[in-house]
Amino acid sequence: MVLSLQDRVKQVSNLYSEEQNGMSLIIEPYNANWAVIDQDTKRILNQLTQSRTIGELRSKDGGNIEQTLTILFDAGLIEVNGQKNQSKSIIQCNLEKSLQLIIFQVTNACNLRCKYCYTDAGSGAKISEEILKKTLSLGICPPRDRIEFQFHGGEPLLAYDRVRNAVDYGYGLAEKRGISVRFSLQTNLVELTEDMVKFFKTNKIHIGTSLDGPKKYHDQNRIFRKGKGSFDVVTEKLGLLKKHELSFGVLCVVSDINVLDGISDFMIEYAIPSMKLNPYFNQGRAIKEESNQAHQEAYAEKEIALMHRIINHNKAHPDNRLKLNHLANMIKNIISRDRNYMCQRNPCGAGLSMLGVGYDGKIYPCHEMIGKNDLVIGNVLEISSFEEIFDDSETLETLRSRTTETIGECSSCEIKQFCGGGCANKAHNSGNLFNRFEYCTYNKIMYKNLFWELYKDPEGVLALI
Ligand code: SF4
Ligand code: SF4
């Protein structure tokens, strides 16, 4: 940008600032802008709480004031002649997102009885071929040119025949209609066979599974009906995925924060290149369990230490890097305005970019909401396009209005556009859709740490993505 002496410059409103070792982290909360600046730059920024011309600033400061102002403008911390460097807010960009992901509850049956299961799976119903085909047909059609389907449960491998038929039917339809389609499947692996692995490999189906760290942690929660832990079976089946070089991701639910101390060693031992760590949420069966929400500071502290261990490992083994997917999502939110991960969007992806379809054909804004009668927005057997419900549903309108501007405690938060205010479904569990994220304290500590780490060691942090 070319600046002239008559141009008027001013700080954008509500800047947040904190100091470390003579440097300042400045965050502009409304549009996810931030920078770490030195004290000379901060002094100039401080003069801009009121509008000033560049000529006025130059007579006071001399030097190349234009260069400093360009840095501040590019970082989104000042406006020039009333103009910011971004025309649309992140919220506006997110509201333009279209349907990208449909998650099927293929069955409500499950062979495990995990203590924290959010759907309280187990009753045994299975989706019909008719519902599967109708959903695929509604999803694989214009205005979309691409769509992803995920098979979820319960445990979808207990309805493997349905999964197979859906994949064959979906690919056939996609080819006929010229639309790109992808499939993924979330499984506990217990029923996995070599034939299934070959089918998944041939059809490029990404597998997501769950492994809660070393045996002593995993077997506390991920148990069979009679209480036996599933670690030995799951790690054996994981070997099948590795043998056939299938693309897979691992989710680890952190029910005991001490698991974080050993996760990097565990990933190395079991050759798991990336993991997503999820905190233990108060939902489904977990409501009966003790929560670690009371220890969010300690949780964040242990995770920061884990991040440093992984950064060090990655520097020593650049060809064998480890990743933590949830941290990667946070880092992406910091370095970019894109919000591809729909659970850290503002508003989140529920009913905007994703839908959940229950085994009975009922449609929900998100798969986590499956089974909640007050959040049903239709039934696939009764509609002729998803756009019908997208335009008319009051529930979706309410969800889309759930932004950090309307969640009371989030509206004044300095990291609101990075955090997004948390999961709408978990807020619904708490009794008020407009409650903030239950791990708010953890998120604040983690994000602020990541800003500083990105400034101090950009190479190490960016290698985590
Ligand atoms: S949940 Fe907490 S960290 Fe996230 S935006 Fe709201 S107040 Fe900020
Ligand atoms: S409701 Fe929760 S799980 Fe569903 S898309 Fe929103 S943040 Fe993600």
Image (spheres, rainbow, N blue to C red):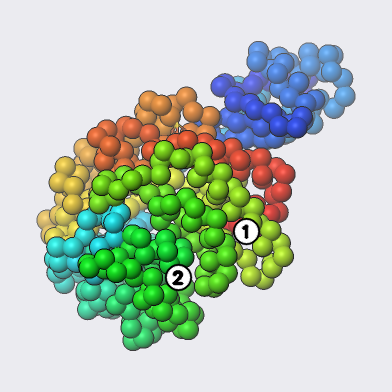
Q: Position of residue 448 (x, y in %)?
A: 59, 37
Depth order, front residue of 158/357: 158
Depth order, front residue of 436/72: 436
**Considering only vertical position in the picture, is 277 above or below 168?**
above
Front position among marks 2 and 1:
1
**Considering only vertical position in the picture, is 61 above or below 272?**
above
Query: Split into 4 quadrants, where in the image is the N terminus?
Result: top right
- Residue 248's disc is 2
Residue at 38% in and 81% down: 197
Depth order, front residue of 134/333: 333
Q: Amino acid at mark 1?
A: Ile
> What is the secondary structure assignment of the residue under circle 2?
strand
Q: Position of residue 293 (x, y in %)?
A: 40, 41
Q: How many marks?
A: 2
* Residue 404 makes an appearance in the image: yes
Residue at 57% in and 21% down: 13
Residue 407: image quadrant is top left
Q: Amino acid at mark 2?
A: Phe
Q: In the image, is 205 to the left or to the right of 158?
A: right
Residue that badge 1 annotates:
310
